Image (cartoon, rainbow, N blue to C red):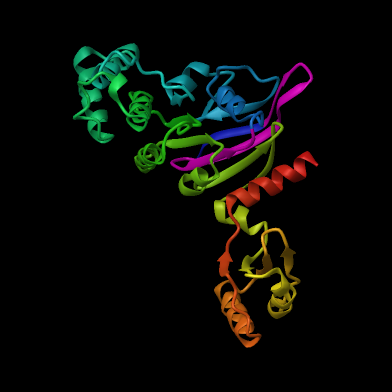
Amino acid sequence: MTYSLIAERLTKRYGDVAALDEFDLAVRAGSIHGLLGPNGAGKSTVVRAFSTLIDVDSGSATVAGHDTRTAPASVRRSIGLIGQSPAVDEILGGRQNLMMFGRLFGLGRDAARSRADELLDRFGLTEAGSRPVSGYSGGMRRRLDIAAGLILTPAVLFLDEPTTGLDPRGRSEVWATIRQIAEAGTTVLLTTQYLDEADQLADTITVMNAGRVVASGTPDELKRQLGADRVVVTVKDAADIDRVAASVRIDREPVIDLASLTVTVESPAGAAGLLRAVRALDAAGIEPEDLALRRPTLDDVFLSLTRKENA
């Protein structure tokens, strides 16, 4: 298996604070890898270390086979980096922006124009290409920003919280763009605080806290760490909650929450457990307010892991 990004025991301290604490990572070529963590977890520090913007105190990192310390110029030629704030000029049009970046990357005028037109078409921005960027929507502006990072078709693209501040439509547009990039063969490292974003996009995920890796795996693997699916019964009247709990108590002890009037019980059998709960409640003559099968989410995983780390 080929890895585009490898970090081994990366450590970076700022005074008494460890921004990275023996951080390890391996990202498969051509995949989308999500880097999750609360503010201050070290996500942006990882990106800066991989992109040679900072020197680490110890450990090693390679990008597309190039060592960040011994071959920084080769690393920079292999990457695209999109920060949290758009880097495009709002006065210029979309095509002018991309041509400017192309020229900065060393392309000739004709090659820069050809590449700009290609990227505008690829990301659905051709019709807006001549308009000033100041008139673009948030999603369009972010897509143009990402296109600028792809001028030289990098082996690895770093996206540092790319959808912060976007509305749902803008986020959806950027998600589609990120999928296109990965399908074309570019490895994507995505830092985000949006758990649904990582769930939608990432092939694999690393959860960070205080500069350390606290968990890694596919979204489904991380969710399974929290155990089985859960059947959640919402009752109409608090007086019924004990009867409901007794009815659905089959393989696991239910959890009662009086504040939300819910009874929750693990269901290793998944949907079959929901069917058993329906039959048990019907047999007891209980009509719930609501009944649902709830699968663990990345939000559950994130909160559980970071809560343990901070305990």
Point 22% across, 21% down: residue: 131
- Identify the residue shown where x is 59% and y is 78%: 287
Q: Is residue 28 magenta?
A: yes
Instruction: Say which quadrant the C terminus sits in.
Output: top right
Q: Does 120 appear in magenta?
A: no
Q: Position of residue 134 (x, y in %)?
A: 31, 19
Rendered view: 76 above or below 223? above
**Picture coordinates of residue 229, whole percent (x, y):** 61, 65
Query: Is residue 2 visible in the rendered structure shown here?
Result: no
Q: How many marks?
A: 0
- 252 and 83: which one is in front? 252
Is residue 252 depicted above or below 149 in this figure? below
Q: Position of residue 120 (x, y in %)?
A: 25, 29
Say left or right for 197 vs 180.
right
Q: Residue at x 45, y 25 (%)?
A: 82
Percent coordinates x, y for residue 196 in the rendering? 51, 46
Say which of 262 and 86 sits in front. 262
Note whether residue 204 is visible. Answer: yes
Determine whether, in the image, residue 6 is placed left or right of residue 84.
right
Residue 63 drawn above or below residue 2: above
**In the picture shown, does residue 202 fall above or below 42?**
below
Write down the quadrant of residue 11 in the picture. Answer: top right
Nearer the observer, 242 or 183 = 242
Q: Which residues are magenta?
A: 9-38
Q: Determine the residue positioned at 42% across, 31% down.
A: 155
For the stretch drawn in magenta, the main secondary structure is: strand
Tell which residue pokes out farthest to the bottom in this image: 283
Query: Which residue is at the front of the view, 136 or 178?
Result: 136
Q: Quadrant of residue 118?
A: top left
